[in-house]
Amino acid sequence: MKKAAVIGLGDISSIHLAALKANPQVQLCAVCDIDPAARSRAPEGVPFYTDYKEMAREAMPDCVHVCLPHYLHYPVSKYFAEQGIHVFCEKPVALNAAQGREFAALEAAHPAVHIGICLQNRLNESVEMLKDIISSGEYGAVQAAKGVVLWARPKEYYDVKPWRGKWETAGGGCMINQSVHTLDLLYYLGGDIESLRASVAQLLDYGIEVEDTVAVRLNYASGAKGLFLATIANDENESVQISVRLEKAKFAIIDSVLYRIEADGTRTRLCEDAKLPGTKFYYGASHAKLIAKFYRAIEEGTDDYIHVRDALMSIRLIDAVQQSGRFGKTVAL
């Protein structure tokens, strides 16, 4: 049985804690948050710390879950990796591509340490099936792909946690925070992206530094074309939509259901994702699936999990979008 600890008891930590509790091969040995008031959110009977280095010395976890603000993902993960402790880190993998490359170098320098990145939507049932369909070649090569994220965030979202609206602590806005999963899937499903051109904007008068809306045209190395739209200026959180057009058929994930879109526009239902209960259903329900997969990899000594190197393209794409939006030009990857 592996001993696990969770660092950061914010919104996403509850999903990690629930997944660890449900895994009989893992014992939660400690939780940590810099805010002493977060003790009230700690599971009963689990030691609480405000200093993660003290927690490492006393609780001696085999693995830590990094559920901290973006700017702390790499430095905290680095500390534990250098102690020989496995790391499961929430998205994004880093603040920017340069830091992402440092993280990938850290991973390469510590081959005995598993460093997993939480891009759990790759394990959604709809995505797994669509990936298999594309890989099979049955319907030909990818011709086009599209990802749309129409979500809502009030001004209070940034007022309560000001780090979310600043470049130096968040690394970006709606892309890096709300829609990095969708951008990752456009690469994961569609293949290598050669270049892109983007429009980056603020539609909301929130007084933050980072973007709230983006529109991106993707040019795949294969010649396929892609479109990525993301905003938090919608009036509600709608289901993420992803579509992929192959040479002989079109497929779409709509309301967490994978469909084959027939020539006459009718839909053939193929599978449906498991859903997270409650108001944050849009997070998806694959955290527990990915976390269980990560601990199996640790136990069995395999590399069957999402590595830093696998997640690096998502942050490279975000950097390229920001650069394209800033200078109004096509950016090569």
Image: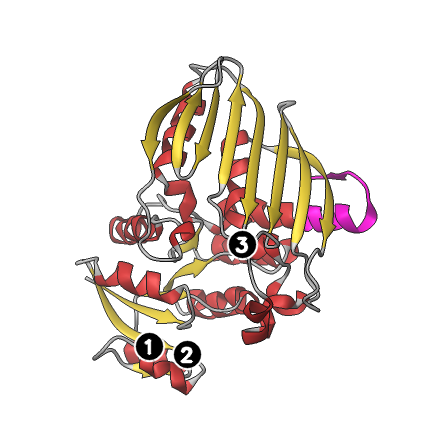
Relative to 229, is 59 above or below?
below
Q: Position of residue 154 (x, y in %)?
A: 57, 64
Q: Residues within 10 Å of mark 2 (few under 14, many from 20)?
A: many
Q: Which residue is mark 1?
A: 41
Quadrant in which the C terminus is drawn: top right
Mark drawn on residue 33:
2
Label 2 and label 3: CA atoms lie apart by 23 Å
> Is 326 part of what is drawn in magenta?
yes
Mark drawn on residue 311:
none
Relative to 150, is 60 above or below?
below
What range is drawn magenta here?
A: 319-333
User: Tag 2: residue type?
Assistant: Asp
Residue at the (68%, 57%) spot, across then down: 211
Residue at the (74%, 45%) spot, across then down: 199
Earlier residue among tags 1 and 2: 2
Please state if 185 lies on the left or on the right of 328 as rendered.
left
Q: Nearer the viewer, residue 183 or 154?
A: 154
Q: Is residue 101 visible?
A: no
User: Tag 1: residue type?
Assistant: Arg
Q: Nearer the viewer, residue 310 or 162?
A: 162
Mark drawn on residue 178:
3
Q: Position of residue 102 (x, y in %)?
A: 59, 58
Tell me which corner region of the image, top left, top right, bottom left or bottom right, holds residue 52. Answer: bottom left
The answer to whether marks 2 and 3 mark residues whose Cβ atoms lie closer than 8 Å is no
User: Tag 3: residue type?
Assistant: Gln
Q: Position of residue 216 (x, y in %)?
A: 68, 40
Q: Nearer the viewer, residue 299 or 74?
A: 74
Quadrant in which the N terminus is drawn: bottom left
